[in-house]
Image (cartoon, coloured by chain):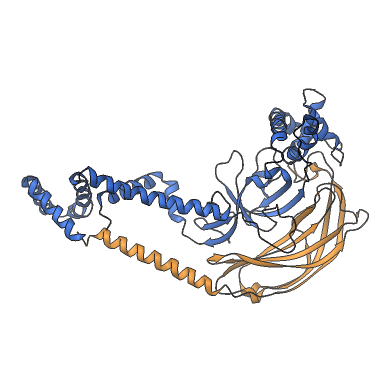
Chain colours: A orange, B blue
């Protein structure tokens, strides 16, 4: 019964997939100890716009609560980030973002991602932006942002070719929002 | 094992009349173009059926038991993985291209809902944070979505000790109703003028600290009119069950509203949520991504698109196991 084409194909496929899985696991293990601390510099240059908005201002289904006026801020950052030490053969891309988080009476913890970028190659891994404006709207649930202390964190997440996702972040700045609306 | 097989083969060929087999052989030799087909496909399949027919009840039962053993051990491995990761679906296949270049169609993701111990996370109830790639399902959509969280608003509630008396039901119903009906409360306020509210709704609207405001545009009116009947039903159901479940269900102890977006999309996901839904809650989240394997899920996509392949594969494998010919 031994040598039909199906048996041969079956053994070949089993062996190939087992070997591939083993090699992938071993290879991703070699990357486990590769942790690096990239060089981060972030500065909030200015608050360009800071005003309350109503939900219908932008789109029909705006990302804020119904019938409620919410604070919105537009910020301008300066960002310098060196991601080159994080790159290895097992790095498919690195996802970078600038997050703002703050506390209000209504919500104990609000975290909003203001800007993000994807870096796929080591040659593009040295980021030096003079003017980064927030990509996503910085909108509070409510009107609690005036005079609020906001933490700004730069976060990076490494996506491997195969294996475990990992990343890190650095709390860079804690800036107080203006006490009055701007613009 | 192989010798036994050969013996059974010889016994069957001697017990059954020889003429059909010799006729088959003659046919094989005559048409060489289809001989490959017969030799490699038809003959093994007929071998399988012959082997099954040749077994008595005891052998057949044994083979069926081994098949059941395989199926149940696969199920046990799956379930223990679900328990370890605290998630109902620990392994998923990426179906859309909205997270490229990170995840492509056909990649496998490993999910988990286990809490990560982190120094700055003092609110232990949260299971997902901004920046994580989560898989979530939306009511009305059968396929879960893999996207990244870009906004998160979290607030833990301290529920008062539940004394199960009706006098405290309105206050203890606040935690549960606020979480799920917050988005509907704006629409509920419109209904107060029309009457027909339970007492809990009045309590809810009067304690909202940021006044409801008067920003009611035409768009909201249209939304409210279409969603009103649904929302009324939802909120009244929530309140009747809340006093019994306010202390037991952990989902009532905090509010966590999130907004997601695919890396490859320009807009955030508000357009993908259910009509009237503005935020994603933790109950929608199936898990956050912790691991990744490329391309392995392509077979699953193939089987999804052509379910006949899936059934055929299971049928053939079942036959092979029962007949004892495992290659």
Nearer the observer, B275 or B258: B258
Residue that appears at 55% across and 48% down? B88
Q: What residue appears at the point 59 percent right and 54 percent down from the top-left corner?
A: B98
Q: Is residue B322 left or right of residue A63?
A: left
**Residue A178: percent from left, percent from top:** 91, 58
Q: Farthest residue to the front: give it.
A: B163
Relative to B45, does residue A43 appear above or below in the rendering? Answer: below
Q: Nearer the viewer, residue A182 or A174?
A: A174
Position of B305 with respect to B88 (left or right) is: left
Residue pictured at 20% horizontal, 60% vertical: B2
Q: Residue at x 17, y 54 (%)?
A: B35
Tally of marks: 0
Residue that protrudes farthest toward the right in the picture: A180
Residue B184 place in picture, x, y as percent: 74, 36
For the N terminus of chain B, the image quarter is bottom left
Question: In the picture, which quadrant includes the C terminus of chain B?
Answer: bottom left
In this view, the residue farthest toward the bottom is A85
Q: Which is more toward the observer, B115 or A115? A: B115
Q: Is residue B218 visible?
A: no
Q: Is there any visible trace of residue B203 in the rendered image?
A: yes
Image coordinates for residue A40, horizontal then vertical, percent: 75, 72
Residue A127 spot, x, y in % from top left = 71, 72
Q: Is residue B176 above or below residue B320?
A: above
B84 or B227: nearer the viewer:
B84
Is residue A7 shown left or right of residue B70?
left
């Amino acid at each position: 019964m031994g040598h039909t084409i199906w048996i041969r194909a079956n053994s070949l496929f089993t062996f190939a997939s087992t070997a591939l899985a083993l090699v992938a696991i071993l290879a991703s293990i070699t990357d486990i100890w590769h942790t690096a601390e990239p060089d981060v510099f972030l500065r909030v240059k200015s608050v360009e716009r800071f005003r309350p908005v109503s939900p219908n201002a932008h789109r029909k289904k705006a990302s804020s609560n119904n019938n409620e006026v919410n604070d919105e801020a537009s910020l301008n950052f300066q960002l310098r980030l060196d991601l080159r030490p994080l790159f290895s053969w097992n790095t498919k891309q690195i996802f970078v973002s600038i997050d703002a988080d703050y506390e209000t009476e209504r919500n104990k913890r609000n975290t909003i991602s203001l800007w993000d970028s994807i870096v796929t190659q080591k040659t593009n891994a040295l980021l030096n932006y003079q003017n980064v404006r927030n990509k996503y709207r910085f909108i509070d649930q409510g009107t609690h942002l005036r005079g609020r202390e906001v933490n700004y964190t730069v976060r990076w997440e490494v996506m491997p070719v195969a294996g475990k996702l990992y990343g890190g972040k650095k709390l860079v700045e804690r800036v107080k929002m203006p006490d009055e609306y701007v613009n | 094992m192989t010798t036994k097989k050969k013996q059974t083969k010889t016994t069957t060929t001697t017990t059954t009349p020889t003429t059909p087999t010799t006729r088959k052989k003659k046919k094989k030799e005559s048409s060489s173009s289809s001989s490959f087909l017969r030799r490699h496909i038809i003959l093994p399949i007929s071998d399988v059926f012959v082997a099954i027919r040749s077994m008595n009840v005891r052998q057949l039962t044994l083979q069926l038991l081994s098949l059941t053993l395989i199926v149940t051990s696969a199920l046990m491995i799956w379930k223990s993985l679900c328990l370890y990761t605290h998630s109902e679906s620990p392994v998923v296949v990426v179906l859309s291209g909205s997270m490229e270049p990170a995840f492509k169609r056909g990649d496998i993701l490993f999910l988990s809902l286990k809490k990560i111990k982190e120094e700055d996370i003092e609110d232990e109830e949260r299971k997902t944070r901004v920046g994580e790639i989560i898989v979530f399902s939306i009511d009305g959509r059968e396929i879960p979505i893999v996207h990244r969280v870009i906004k998160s608003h979290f607030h833990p509630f301290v529920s008062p000790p539940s004394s199960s008396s009706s006098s405290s039901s309105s206050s203890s119903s606040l935690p549960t109703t606020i979480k799920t009906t917050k988005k509907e409360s704006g629409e509920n306020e419109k209904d107060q003028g029309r009457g027909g509210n339970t007492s809990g709704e009045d309590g809810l609207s009067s304690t909202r600290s940021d006044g409801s405001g008067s920003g009611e545009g035409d768009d909201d009116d249209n939304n409210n009119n279409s969603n009103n009947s649904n929302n009324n039903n939802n909120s009244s159901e929530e309140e009747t069950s809340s006093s019994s479940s306010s202390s037991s269900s952990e989902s009532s102890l905090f509010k966590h509203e999130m907004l997601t977006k695919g890396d490859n999309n320009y807009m955030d996901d508000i357009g993908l949520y259910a009509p009237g839904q503005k935020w994603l809650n933790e109950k929608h989240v199936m898990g956050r991504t912790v691991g990744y394997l490329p391309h392995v899920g392509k077979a699953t996509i193939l089987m999804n698109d052509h379910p006949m392949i899936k059934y055929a594969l299971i049928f053939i494998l079942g036959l092979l196991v029962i007949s004892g010919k495992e290659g």
